[in-house]
Amino acid sequence: MKRQRGRSRRQTTKAAVARSRTVRLVHIAHARSGDKGDTANIGLIALRPEDYPLLVKQVTAARVAKHFKGIIKGPVERFELPNLNALNFLLHGALDGGGTMSLKTDAQGKVFSTALLRMEIEVGR
Amino acid sequence: MSSRPATVRVAAGQGFWGDWMEAPYRQVTGGPVDYLMLDYLAEVTMSILQKQKSRDPSLGYATDFVTQVERILPIVVERGIRVTANAGGVNPRACAAAVADVARKLGLRGKLKIGVVTGDDLLDRLDGLVARGHQLANMDTGRPLRDVRDRVLSANAYLGAAPVVDALERGAQVVITGRVTDTGLTLGPLMHAFGWARDAWDLIAAGTVAGHIIECGAQASGGNCLRDWESVPDLANVGYPIVEAQADGTFELIKHPRTGGRIDVPAVTEQLVYEMGDPREYITPDGIADFTTIQLAHVAKDRVRVSGVRGKPATDKLKVSIAYFYGYKAVGTLVYAWPDALKKAQAADRVLRQRLDDLGLKFEAILTEFVGASATHGALALADVDGGGSEIPEVQLRIGVRAADKKPVDRFTREIAPLILNGPPSVTGFAGGRPKPEEIVAYWPALIDRTVVQPTIEIVEA
């Protein structure tokens, strides 16, 4: 079954549906990721400055850790860069040892960026 | 130097060893530049170079650099462009000798001064350092170096901009270094040209940010840029980034006219956050830059201004990059076709794992990926695959193993091909033959007191 896009199945009441909708981060942010040893970093940048507060509020370290559950082994740290409308995430234990040790296709964490952009967040209508 | 320039242009020509061979030539011919910065060293590069040097004492540096220099040297000498490169790897003197040979071959005898920066290589000093109480503990795990001491292949302290400045002050037109930081190769020229003091922390931080932005080459000028990627013009002809700096530490990112790519705030921002840790403390041997103070402004087409950068004093430690022999790994692949490509690949994985198990082979890790379905985004992607993947045209089964001993890894490499005839159907893509076990050289980051590392500068005349 094709998943319905742009509308959360979690929204139950009509009022809540009227107030907000869910979109994938890819529609309101861009990102770049890289590595430091076994840690992947993801810089998440709002496409429009006015959406940066949405990222700060909803894309928490805990939410990102849940998003990558089963994919990373360690904790997630988050740093704010309001000057760049960006958040920086460190995903520890993300790269099967990292560098030359890793058996992963993405041994250097280059596409963790777009994996994060799959996340759905709520935005105003 | 008596007069200071109003602006200084530092052009990036290589973002890693293996980057575009055309870029250095394009940077010195596409428009005016004062410095060409070439970065070759990644974390594991030093150990590869050390291995080459142990086989042939005249090797151990980035040989691409010599090829590139041969092409640009006449232009560089004629226009007075100065080059900073960490191409020296674990053998900067041999690299300088090779460049001097090239210069003489090009008729530039007596016209080229090469600065050689050494002192970063700690391999022969390790036991003495450990004996004097320098633990060189792993920054990530805390383990002491003695756990892997007998397997260490290379050990290099990260030097900063200071020795690059010293070499430039002594008249070097080409500065060849070992493990100098990527950012130091850009900051050094700016400190030299503007006479920035070594404790002018905001200026040091500004030059460090400039270096960070251009150290990955075209990644700051439209390459690998996700935001609106389809509209980035003419990547085939991409212009590598250039820092146009002023004495007060503000600078603009530009590229040569009539080149492709794009320099705008989103592209520069993507590069700023690349490989970032704590943005308030971007630590280099030269000082600490606070990335939360950076202000970006789009001032014209393909021109972004960077200002406001604040810095803090350098720490009393230097980072040391140590590489050691870890073990072996091998990766094998097979391709499964529609229908039910993913299910076939998954079935093949189960068969293979059972056989490895039945053979009693012990691995530290076995990793299976299904390229085309879930290799890069894992379960996050599988959730979006329609109909359980039955309609995916093809899936590559990619399975890797890692072990301390070579034997099980070697045996594993013989278990892939049989699956073509004795496993699930619709399988192809084994043209590459049996995978080869690879040696794993692992990375051991450590810290050491700054005082025990003494950079040395020599000047070699062509």
Image: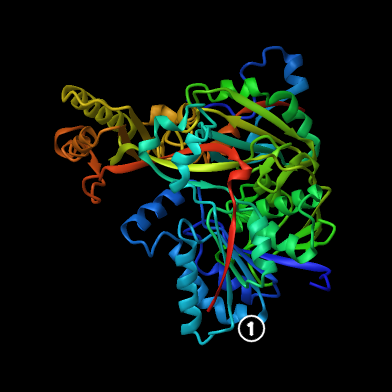
Image colouring: rainbow
Residue at left offset 20%, top offset 35%? B407
Residue at left offset 63%, top offset 32%? A89
Residue at left offset 61%, top offset 80%? B77
Q: Is residue A78 above or below residue B14?
A: above
**Dot 1 crowding, Cα within 10 Å, few <14, some 14–19, many 20+:** few
Residue B262 visible within the image: no
Q: Is residue B243 above or below residue B31?
A: above
Along the line of sight, the residue nearer the viewer: B222 or B360: B360
* On-image quarter of the N terminus of chain B: bottom right
Q: Residue furthest top?
A: A13
Along the line of sight, the residue nearer the viewer: B69 or B459: B459
Residue B180 visible within the image: yes
Quadrant for residue B458, please give it: bottom right
> The disc labelled 1 sits on which kind of residue?
Glu
Along the line of sight, the residue nearer the viewer: B403 or A122: B403
Return the x and y of residue B98 as percentages of the image width and height: 45, 72
Return the x and y of residue B88 as percentages of the image width and height: 50, 61
Element carrying mark 1: helix
Which chain letter goes with mark 1? B
Return the x and y of residue A86 as percentages of the image width and height: 72, 37
In this rendering, would B85 be left or right of B437?
right
Residue picked out by circle 1: B78
Q: Residue furthest bottom?
A: B107
Return the x and y of residue B46 as percentages of the image width and height: 45, 51
In this rendering, would B410 be left or right of B314?
left
Mark count:
1
